[in-house]
Image (spheres, rainbow, N blue to C red):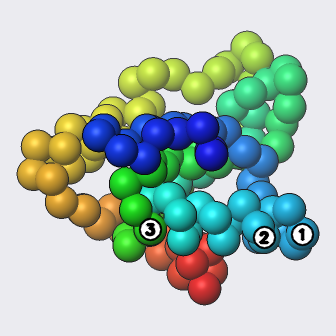
Amino acid sequence: MRKLRRHTRPGRAAVVVPNGTLFGDGVCARIKEDLLKEFNLHTIVRLPNGVFAPYTSIPTNILFFDRSGPTKTVWYYEHPLPEGRKNYTKTQPLQFEEFAPLIAWWKKRKENDQVWKVPASDCSPTAATSIERILG
């Protein structure tokens, strides 16, 4: 995180972390504090179980941040599992087409340069309260 440049064009990064990293104590709490105060943590994408199968079956998050200033707003997207599935597996992995809503939102956001809220139909009921817990 500290290697991202600050001046001219701020550095950007995306990091995959296990679910719960932003809620932990000790080092996790310090990383969360740094991400919110020194970096712009603008997007969190929560991935379901099995996305990285066979290496791990735990749920993960992708954190998108840059060095443009402190965090003001965070967009949270919880990727839903397809109907009738309990998790992804090595033989039935995540398909690129399943990210169509996320990609469409990202393009629209970049074009309009503003933050969009995720429609309730695109994420689980816990998504709105999850982001409040992260920032709270």
| C-alpha distance separating marks 2 and 1 | 5 Å
| C-alpha distance separating marks 1 and 3 | 21 Å
Give the mark nearer the N terminus: 3 vs 2. Answer: 2
Q: Callout 3: helix, strand or loop?
A: loop
Instruction: Name the mark nearer the viewer: 3 or 2.
Output: 3
Residue 120 numbered mark, or none: none
Q: Are discs 2 and 1 less than 8 Å apart at CB?
A: yes
Q: Position of residue 122 (x, y in %)?
A: 38, 56
Question: Which class describes the residues within 10 Å of circle 2: few (<14), some (14-19), or many (20+)?
Answer: some
Residue 119 sits above or below residue 101 on the image: below
54 horizontally vs 45: left or right: right
Picture quarter with the N terminus = top right
Residue 13 sits above or below residue 91 on the image: below
Q: Are discs 1 and 3 less than 8 Å apart at CB?
A: no
Residue under numbered circle 1: 26
Q: Amino acid at mark 2?
A: Ala
In which image quadrant can residue 29 be found? bottom right
The residue at the point 15 percent across, 53 percent down is: 113
Give the mark nearer the N terminus: 1 vs 3. Answer: 1
Q: Amino acid at mark 3?
A: Pro
Residue 29 numbered mark, or none: 2
Q: Callout 2: helix, strand or loop?
A: helix
Q: Position of residue 101 (x, y in %)?
A: 32, 42
120 horizontally vs 105: left or right: right
